[in-house]
Amino acid sequence: ASMAGVPFFNGFLSKEMMLEEASHTVFLDNPWLFPAMATLAALCSVAYSARLAIGTFLGPERHDYPHHPHDPPPGMWLPVALLVVPVILIGLVPALVEPLVATTAQAVVGGALPDYHLALWHGVTPALVMSLIALFGGALLFLLQAPVDKVRRAVPRPEAKALFEAVVNGCVFFARRFLAVLHDGALERYLGIMVSAIVAVGAYGFWSASHGAGNRPLLPVSLSGLAAWFALAAASIAVLFVHAQRLFALILTSIVGLVVSLAFLQFSAPDLALTQIAVDVVTTILLLLALNLLPKQTPPERRPVVRWRDALLAGAVGLGVAGIAYQVMTRNGTTIADYYLAESKPGGGGTNVVNVILVDFRGYDTFAEIIVLGIAAISIYALLDLVLKSAAVRRLKAQRPKEEAQDAHPLILVVATRVLLPLTLTVGVYIFLRGHNEPGGGFIAGIVVAIALIMQYIASGYAWAAERMKADAQGMIGAGVAVAGLTGMAAFAFGHPFLTSAHGHFHLPVVGDIELASAMAFDLGVFLTVVGVMLLSLGQLARVEQRVDPAPESAAPMDIPLEPPPKAPLPEPAPAGARPQEA
């Protein structure tokens, strides 16, 4: 009865409110179409509610049950009876639930509610007329159920289940065809779609906004800066034409990295310049190791149409980035740099603002970055470990030219790397210790130390270096992340947030007065992680190289045995009577 909207039940109240709103709704410029549809829906709800209740409880008695029916136990009818009580109570006294309705509706609407009032009688309104039509029409439809059902059965009608399954199957079919065309595993297509979408969104944002020239004056152009710019532009353009020659292209990209580091020096950022050079060296070593496992030249070029398409897309991206850079650099804006410059010493205990930002002000970013570095290195290790166990190594061996030089480990390179190893390690420690107040820090020191160690792999071979490398690269990554995390958690013991640093002056015997900061322990974690990442990834590449082109068995370079070779056994004494030449 409540579902049918019979008066004195709570369903009557909700149906009246629905019909009241429907009576004022204009649909397709017609004021009566939507009210008629709502009335028809209410009429059908009365009809099927009457059929459900009367057909179940007041229909003809049946005797074809497999078992004699009996009343349900209280566990089945009591929950329903409990729900019936508020249905009747709310229908008789609607004012009881007005506060609850207001609270619930306001949470959904998120603001002020329209004026409403729950009551059984609002006078003769359009909603009341529509409700009476629905009640009497639904009852009439129920009474005419038999002839209406005959007509319904005689008229051909679509099966809802079949329609639903056909729609779902059609959606699945077209989705699979769409994915087969679009998601074909081609990285080039994915990048093309992503970059095109970025360019389209950026172009829309640019052309839909107002434009104005910046009023910040440009810096004067120096001769050295102009020469560096020409070198940068020439190297970048040359890569487009000689990229098929991979080694030459790698040299040209190194020129780009060098010019960028000079730009950092020009604008008083020695930390960034030192980091750029160190990262460029590591990247060059990494790519040299990788290129040694690849063909010397790239595969044949694609169709000119595809190349021009890619060139236009790349040109659009380049113009967009150049435009953004120009717009930013020609405008005066607020910057957070002044805050960092002012608070670096009193807040972080260091005068090297870049290092203080990395290990103190934005230490959480650095902590997340070393975790990402560790995950990347372990992924490289896993991928190359699969290569070592697959047929790829045999294919790489087959690709090697037959006339390769036999000296895989030149003596000059071996001697130079071993002589420079202790010196480079000392420089790395020095850069690490001075990083909080001078250019340096854990990241740069880690790269310098990693370069020194990885050069041992390159100069002397993986087998020789791995035999003497006692440190576990994966363990170093885990230790670095653990040290950085525990340093940040130590602040909890003093009632401060995660990664809050402390600093102060201390007097040590012999050494004297020194200034220490807890961020040094965090920087140590960064150092260990970087060294572990470099050793794990580059060492694994060297390991693949060792499998592809193993060193001769004589092998450990410069491992000259100290003990003399065993003497040849003396000849047996000649038997008596034998001739001297026989003896």
Image (cartoon, grey):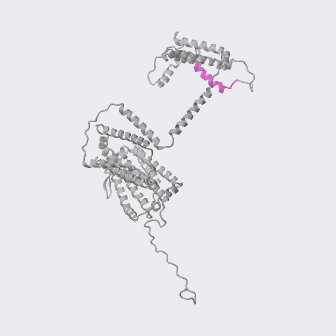
The quadrant the N terminus occupies is: top right
Question: What residue occupies the far bottom of the structure in this picture?
Answer: 577
Q: Is residue 303 above or below residue 47?
A: below
Q: Is residue 568 above or below residue 487?
A: below
Q: Is residue 83 magenta?
A: yes
Residue occupying the point 36% across, 43% down: 361
Q: Which of the pair 534/172 is nearer the observer?
A: 172
Q: Which of the pair 34/99 is nearer the observer?
A: 34
The quadrant the C terminus occupies is: bottom right
Residue 446 visible, this orientation: no
Magenta region: 71-87
Q: Is residue 572 above or below residue 439?
A: below
Q: Is residue 32 magenta?
A: no
Residue occupying the point 58% across, 90% down: 577
Residue 421 visible, this orientation: yes
Residue occupying the point 51% across, 42% down: 184
Main SS category, magenta section = helix
Give the image location of residue 288, x and y in percent.
42, 55
